[in-house]
Image (cartoon, rainbow, N blue to C red):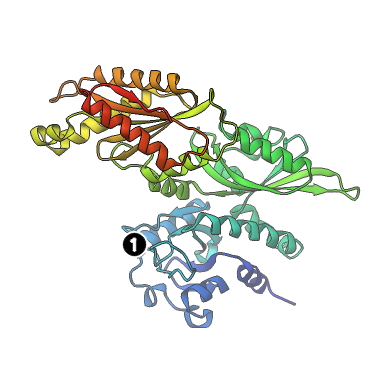
């Protein structure tokens, strides 16, 4: 007869993330295969010993405080594995273009055997979004294959995995405790309600259409969506939704597995955001521009525009008032442009004092009118110490056969002409 502990170890060894069992003193009681492979430390070497002997750099004061909180509240807690709050260092062995030599970790601490003051620590590699998605998909496969064996471990699943079941109308029929606790609803509040009510209104229309299309075809769907907790806080979830088919191959219900990727999304947002103005950076703008160039529905009368804007006499602002005031000018200009553009337009900081704007569904006349609107808005700004500033604009539109380089060249040419012709004006360059 296999013991309950042996069953747990089999389950832990099958997981695609690190799982260890430690007590309040940081003594290790379980160390799964994922950790053996990625740390190079065998389970028989570390089990029964203290983590301090292997990872002296871990912030044990903070770690033990999280363990005690988990045991006291009997609810999962998140350990912030940041530079100032160190966790165990695990090297990245995957071939990647990233400069990261160690994994960025997401660490969750869950109550396991409260009477022995033991907790289960789950470690997730959030270094790569694609790898995270593959891990979640693999987890779904594993859950299906191990369903019979995991019945005895239902409590562990119920308290650690966010799972929700719905009928064919997306009305909730069952949820795990982990799902209820994370979203802040009681199970009774969720049962009978629509799962779609958790989605942020007005967002993800494309994803919802794709999801419905997949489910109508009786296929599994996976994707990322921003959803709402009961307290109104928005969080990002990686979701996998699978239909349950009866003997007639008809879908009778759906099972959705959620995984919180909010912190990963924040890191992702930082990578495409200009730190000073909080606008998109040049890298993100290049990605969006390339996507727009690939669209096939543009015509002569309905194309997209590109505007390059440059603050006039910006060097003299820096020289006269200092770079801190110069930064304030750039932030004010970014805020003014953000308030002036349409929701469909894409605004980014190109570099230095230059900004770029993509305007979908315009012709040259409309693009020039938009640039004039932005010029006037900037002219009306009043910045402390500096007073008013002006900006010059170069405008062009997409034409068949254009590349991003060609469009930027034409917009830059227009900007050069605007500067040469007296500044605080716009110049359009026709393809």
For the point 78% across and 43% down, the residue is 217
The image quadrant where one finds the N terminus is: bottom right
Q: Is residue 359 visible?
A: no
Residue at point 38% right, 38% down?
408
241, 378: nearer the viewer: 378
Which residue carries the number 1 mark?
61
In which quadrant of the rendered view does residue 5 lie?
bottom right
The residue lying furthest to the left in this view is 320
- For residue 92, say whether it is visible: yes
Q: Residue 148 at x, y = what percent?
A: 77, 63
Q: Residue at x 71, y 62 (%)?
A: 150
Decide: is 24 above or below 204. below
Q: Which residue is nearer to you in this view: 46 or 270?
A: 270
In the current view of this chain or complex, which residue is farthest to the right?
248
Using the rendered view, name the quadrant where residue 297 is placed. Answer: top right
Q: In which quarter of the view is residue 396 placed?
A: top left
x then y, percent, for residue 113: 56, 63
| Image: 27 above or below 206 | below
Q: Position of residue 233 (x, y in %)?
A: 48, 36
Q: How many numbered circles does the render carry?
A: 1
Q: Is residue 134 left or right of residue 217?
A: left
- Asked which secondary structure carries label 1, the reply is helix
Asked if 222 appears above or below 389 in the picture, the reply is: below
Q: Foreground residue, 431 or 116?
A: 431
Q: Nearest the camera: 408 or 173?
A: 408
Question: If the image is split into quadrants, where does the C terminus sit?
Answer: top left
**Rendering coords of residue 350 (x, y %):** 33, 39
Q: Residues within 10 Å of mark 1 (few under 14, many from 20)?
A: few
């Amino acid at each position: 007869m296999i013991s309950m502990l042996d069953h747990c170890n089999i389950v832990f060894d099958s997981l695609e993330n690190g799982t260890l069992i430690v007590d309040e003193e940081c003594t290790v009681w379980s160390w799964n295969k994922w950790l053996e492979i990625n740390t190079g430390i065998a389970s028989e070497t570390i089990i029964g010993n203290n983590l301090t002997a292997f990872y002296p750099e871990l912030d044990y004061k903070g770690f033990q405080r999280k363990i005690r909180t988990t045991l006291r509240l009997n609810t999962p807690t998140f350990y912030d594995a940041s530079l100032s709050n160190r966790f165990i260092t695990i090297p990245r062995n995957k071939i990647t273009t990233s400069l990261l030599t160690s994994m960025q970790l997401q660490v969750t601490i869950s109550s396991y055997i409260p009477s022995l003051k033991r907790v289960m620590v789950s470690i997730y590699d959030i270094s790569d979004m694609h790898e995270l998605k593959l891990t979640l998909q693999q987890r779904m496969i594993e859950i299906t294959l191990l369903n019979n064996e995991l019945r005895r471990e239902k409590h562990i699943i119920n308290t650690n995995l966010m799972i929700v079941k719905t009928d064919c109308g997306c009305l909730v029929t069952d949820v795990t405790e982990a799902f209820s606790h994370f979203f802040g609803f009681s199970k009774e509040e969720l049962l009978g309600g629509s799962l779609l009510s958790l989605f942020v209104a007005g967002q993800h229309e494309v994803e919802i259409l794709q999801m419905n299309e997949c489910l109508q075809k009786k296929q599994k769907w996976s994707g990322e969506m921003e959803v709402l907790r009961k307290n109104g806080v928005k969080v990002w979830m990686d979701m996998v939704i699978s239909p349950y088919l009866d003997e007639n191959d008809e879908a009778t219900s759906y099972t959705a597995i959620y995984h919180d990727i909010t912190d990963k999304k924040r890191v992702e947002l930082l990578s495409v955001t200009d730190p000073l103005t909080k606008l998109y950076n040049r890298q993100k703008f290049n990605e969006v521009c390339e996507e727009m160039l690939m669209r096939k529905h543009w015509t002569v009368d309905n194309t997209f525009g590109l505007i390059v804007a440059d603050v006039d006499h910006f060097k003299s602002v820096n020289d006269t008032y200092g770079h801190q005031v110069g930064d304030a000018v750039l932030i004010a200009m970014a805020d003014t442009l953000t308030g002036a553009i349409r929701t469909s337009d894409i605004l980014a900081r190109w570099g230095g004092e230059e900004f770029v704007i993509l305007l979908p569904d315009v012709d040259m006349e409309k693009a020039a009118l938009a640039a004039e609107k932005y010029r006037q808005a900037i002219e009306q700004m009043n910045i402390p110490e500096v007073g008013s500033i002006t900006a010059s604009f170069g405008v062009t539109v997409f034409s068949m056969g254009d590349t991003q380089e060609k469009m930027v060249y034409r917009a830059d040419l227009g900007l050069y002409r605007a500067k040469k012709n007296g500044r605080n004006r716009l110049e359009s360059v026709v393809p």
